Amino acid sequence: MTEVYSVPAELAKSAWIDAETYAAWYERSIQDPEGFWAEHGRRIDWIKPFTKVRDVSFSGDVHIRWFHDGSLNVAANCLDRHLATRGDQTAILWEGDDPNESAAITYRDLHERVCRLANAMTALGVAKGDRVTIYLPMIPEAAVAMLACARIGAIHSVVFGGFSPDSLAGRLQDCASSLLITADEGLRGGRKVPLKANADKALETSGSVRNVIVVKRTGGAVQMTAGRDHWYHEITQAAAPTHQPVEIDAEDPLFILYTSGSTGKPKGVLHTSGGYLVYASMTHQYVFDYHEGDVYWCTADVGWVTGHSYIVYGPLANGATTLMFEGVPNYPTVSRFWEVIDKHKVTIFYTAPTAIRALMREGEEPVKKTSRASLRLLGSVGEPINPEAWTWYHRVVGDDRCPIVDTWWQTETGGILITPLPGATPLKPGSATRPFFGVKPVMVDAEGKVLDGAVEGNLCIAESWPGQMRTVYGDHERFVQTYFSTYKGMYFTGDGARRDADGYYWITGRVDDVINVSGHRMGTAEVESALVAHPKVAEAAVVGYPHEIKGQGIYAYVTLVADEEPTEELRKELVNWVRKEIGPIASPDLIQWSPGLPKTRSGKIMRRILRKIAENQFDALGDTSTLADPGVVDDLIENRMNRA
Ligand code: ATP
Ligand code: MG
């Protein structure tokens, strides 16, 4: 039986959305989407107010437009409109990799920095519609660069600072960027990352780039190419501190962002301006129940969509104080997250299951020795969160006091689609619960038949929402093929889900990851959660492999908690454990002890690689450019269990 965590009474009183409001708004958002979104579209400032709400087709000539006769400036919404009321409030609270380094940047200060860079970029010839690639560590200049692009209407493409020269080159070429903004070096976990040297390598094959702006972060030695490379501090000092924001049409592009590559070659997801900002700011307010005075911290990197929508655009559009962290969860110690929370009195904390599982491995003591009294809400995003990790997060980190919002969404969706609202939704550990306003999830079977009631199936979304991606940059055909060809007239998420009798959604993982054992379809997430629930297991990944009798067998990769030794006995114990937790049909056929699992640089388990190894086809691993640590894969291949 799943335990249900009811809404804390105190919270329901002060929350933006309680259970009745959720029901009423949701109903209206589905019955009268035009009216609903016309009203909520006005939450941001428009230069020319829209009169048209949406123009969408998910079939035939696939197109998606929202608020399309309106115009605005996204940066002005995030900065200028706050100056009169909160110019001296902290906009970005920056916490350095070194615990002794931090900074508070006010809205007034951030505005000036963005204006200066916008002027400097304009002087370099960058104009509306041009692509600008941002390859920076988690320093305030990353947000400044994004907002400066938005201010002049340039399209930014942020590339995670942990990517290699090759990955950067691929992304520079794909969108033909004319400007690259980078830093001398990054700093993560006490180690230096040679960003400028990587950029120089990438630029050897990226002919479109005419200018490079370099932020001095560490002061490390770098090569500056005359005529092409400019120091950030020099060109921004020389630029004027004020700037008139450029008028941008609602449907002009705001950014391109490449997906994390869990399932294949990254796609250049294109988001536009008006609808995206409406959706990012609205979800930030209601999902995190953001109130004036909150100190909000999302631990993602700005290189991922979570960093775009929930470090930069959503919070700043709402006039929030958003914390930006340069470092990693385990430096200098595994208490770092909790110490940062105490230091800055963080009230809302949003992180990923991969981080929670890693910290859980270290036990409770590193958490318990900190206070965390300021916290009132926790969030999770990126992968299904195993119930075991959920309850640990709730009990140990949140002291049984803070609701957890498990937010399901994708780079493609621009913002959160399925999520609890803290004042409205009773929680079930492991479930992303219910749809956000205007979101209409549908479950379909393999043949495309829409399924009603409590069922398991493929997750599609029937209606558009303002934050939806508009196209794959430069490849509209791939957009149509990937998302709208599998099921007619619906957006296909690629994820599988189960809907329970209460209408709650449980994301079971990617559809490709569903395994079929002797005719029983099973989501890998369920088997993984059972394994992780064992006290000796820290992390697990499950895939299918060809099995003579069953069709598919279950292959589990298991990482043990610190100090546990793999033994034959433990292997048997785990098989029996899963048998007991789920049933004989789910018991693993093969268990491989894995010191680590292959993950994307955003920390997600790359099951497609594990599948290849399990199938004994390790010479065809596909695109591995987004792999965080390729060494892990060699170890797994060497010790693979299926040598058939
Ligand atoms: P690619 O599309 O390149 O293969 P990716 O899907 O990992 O990479 P993202 O857009 O960063 O790229 O991730 C979105 C995916 O992450 C979702 O489709 C889903 O599989 C998973 N996900 C995100 N949040 C949750 C969540 N709260 N619960 C379950 N799964 C989640
Ligand atoms: Mg995806």
Image (spheres, rainbow, N blue to C red):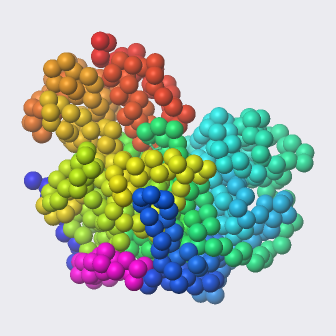
Percent position of residue 429, x then y:
23, 56
Which residues lie in the magenta part?
A: 10-37
Outermost front residue: 60
636 lies left or right of 426: right
Between 485 and 306, the one lying in front of the other is: 485
The structure residue drawn at horizontal position 69% and vertical position 76%, both measured from the top left corner, is 247
Q: Quadrant of the C terminus?
A: top left
Q: Is residue 630 above or below residue 187?
A: above
334 lies left or right of 212: left
Percent position of residue 364, x then y:
31, 48
Q: Is residue 208 above or below residue 91?
A: above
Residue 578 in sight here: no
30 lies left or right of 291: left
The structure residue drawn at horizontal position 46% and vertical position 18%, both measured from the top left corner, is 619
Between 207 and 188, the one lying in front of the other is: 207
**How many numbered discs sit on the rendered protein?**
0
| Residue 30 within the segment the image draws in magenta | yes
Secondary structure predominantly adopted by residues drawn in magenta: helix
The structure residue drawn at horizontal position 77% and vertical position 75%, both measured from the top left corner, is 243
Between 94 and 317, the one lying in front of the other is: 317
Q: Is residue 271 above or below residue 203?
A: below
Percent position of residue 373, x then y:
36, 67
Q: Quadrant of residue 284?
A: bottom left
The structure residue drawn at horizontal position 50% and vertical position 62%, both measured from the top left corner, is 63
Outermost bottom residue: 84
636 lies left or right of 220: left
Q: Quadrant of residue 379?
A: bottom left
Percent position of residue 8, x then y:
23, 73
